[in-house]
Image (cartoon, grey):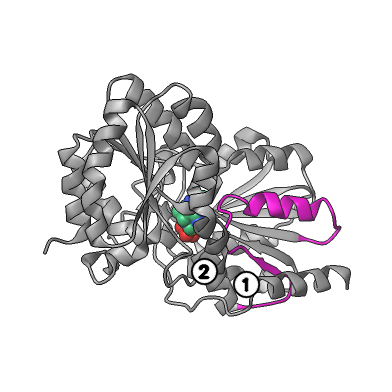
Amino acid sequence: MRHPEEELIEILKGARVDFTASLPCEKIKLLLEMVGETFFHMPLTREEEGVGICAGAALAGRRPAVFVQSSGIGNMINALLSLTGFYELPLAIFVSRRGIYREKIAAQLPMGQRLPGILKGAGISHSLINTQDDLKGIGRKLESVYRNNTVHAFLLSPEIWEGSAGSRVIEKPRHPVRSRSLKYVTGRSAPQFTRYAILKIIAPYLQARIVVCNLGFPSKELYEIRHQPSNFYMLGSMGMVTPIGLGISVSTDREVVVIDGDGSLLMNPGALATAAHLGPKNLTIIAVDNAAYGSTGNQDTLTGSCVDLEILAKGFGIRHTAKAATERQLIDAMKKRPKGLRFIHALAVSGNKDVPNIDIPHLEIKRQFQEFMVR
Ligand SMILES: Cc1ncc(C[n+]2csc(CCOP(=O)(O)OP(=O)(O)O)c2C)c(N)n1
């Protein structure tokens, strides 16, 4: 029997899909790699962007399909209704549905479980694809999408990929300094450390500070390195870490440190503009830039090809910025405390430390944090 990933690729070819876009989910990392190898493919910074790009492709006569995680549907609904649906353009959405099968991340439950109801409420038709056998019905539905100019979501259960090569760990060898953005920065050395090493180096400077940490491996690694009640770990809501830190920093005089990631910042870069506008003196934003969606299998982000996050932060109006590629540079940046909002661009090589999930329930994380805040 063929691997389910191969079977789905064949179905897409059979339906003459010729344009794909994706924002990764860990459960479909192999599928995404194969999609990228087989079709014209656009990596996305935000799922909503994919709706626009696919609408453009459809207007130009192509047959688009987009691949996202169930959480990403939350970022797409408006554009799906007011653009794709409104103009009667075709779009096949392949959704890695979380929260329904052996889910280890509780924050995936609200969107993942309610997804059929959300789609129904939005008037978007969907199919439940729970087993490899269910893949067989996809071809016929795709034909209808492209013939009748409709939107259809295929909700793919993680169970489909179980036991297939899809569960194989993909850690692509990467070239940490092939960044085009290096052109704009003189005297910058190649990053020497992983996110975990960066977190270890900065841990002493986080002590008793309010720390808001990015979702996925960043939070798990920080938890393993040094848990403290003033750490707020994000378990979902990608792109919200800087906004959360901003909301806290304008509500307290204490020092607030945000640990953001390149993928998450690019999903919601406007947060830096809002931060610059408000300019809280007690806020430090550290962007750990491994040029990858590290937590979902190290798929490339655009900081590896064209974006320099420090220049982005400067462009949005953050005056105090620093770039750190070595331990010395990182320590210097942490020690220096200019009067004003600061942004530290910490360059990393990709790679995740094998750490367990955070074993404190989310409401306990909140309780500990709020108790610290009123102390
Ligand atoms: C809206 C949404 N889309 C996709 C995901 C899946 N996801 C979880 S973490 C992550 C990667 C985050 O990348 P980055 O911010 O660069 O941090 P890294 O893991 O590389 O440290 C992705 C894509 C998600 N949780 N939410």
Q: What residue lies at 41% left-to-right and 53% top-to-bottom?
A: 292
- Asked if residue 144 can be seen in this view, the reply is yes
- Give the image quarter of residue 215: bottom right
- Disc 1: CA contacts within 10 A as few (<14), some (14-19) or many (>=20): some
Name the spot of residue 256 as percent of width and height, x first: 74, 59
Image quadrant where one finds the C terminus: bottom right
- Does the magenta stretch mainly form a helix, a strand or a loop? loop
Which residue occupies the foreground of this view, 147 or 260? 147
Q: Secondary structure at mark 2?
A: loop
Q: Residue at x 24, y 49 (%)?
A: 137
Q: Identify the residue position indicated by label 1 in the image.
A: 203
312 up-or-down from 169: above or below: above
* Residue 112 appears left or right of 336: left
Q: Is residue 6 left or right of residue 230?
A: left
Name the amino acid type tagged 2: Ile
Q: Earlier in the sequence, mark 1 or mark 2?
A: 2
Task: Give the label, 1 or 2, closer to the camera.
Answer: 2
- In this view of the protein, which residue sits in the foreground, 70 or 212? 70
Which region of the structure is painted magenta? 226-255
Residue 183 lies in what quarter of the image?
top left
Q: Secondary structure at mark 1?
A: helix
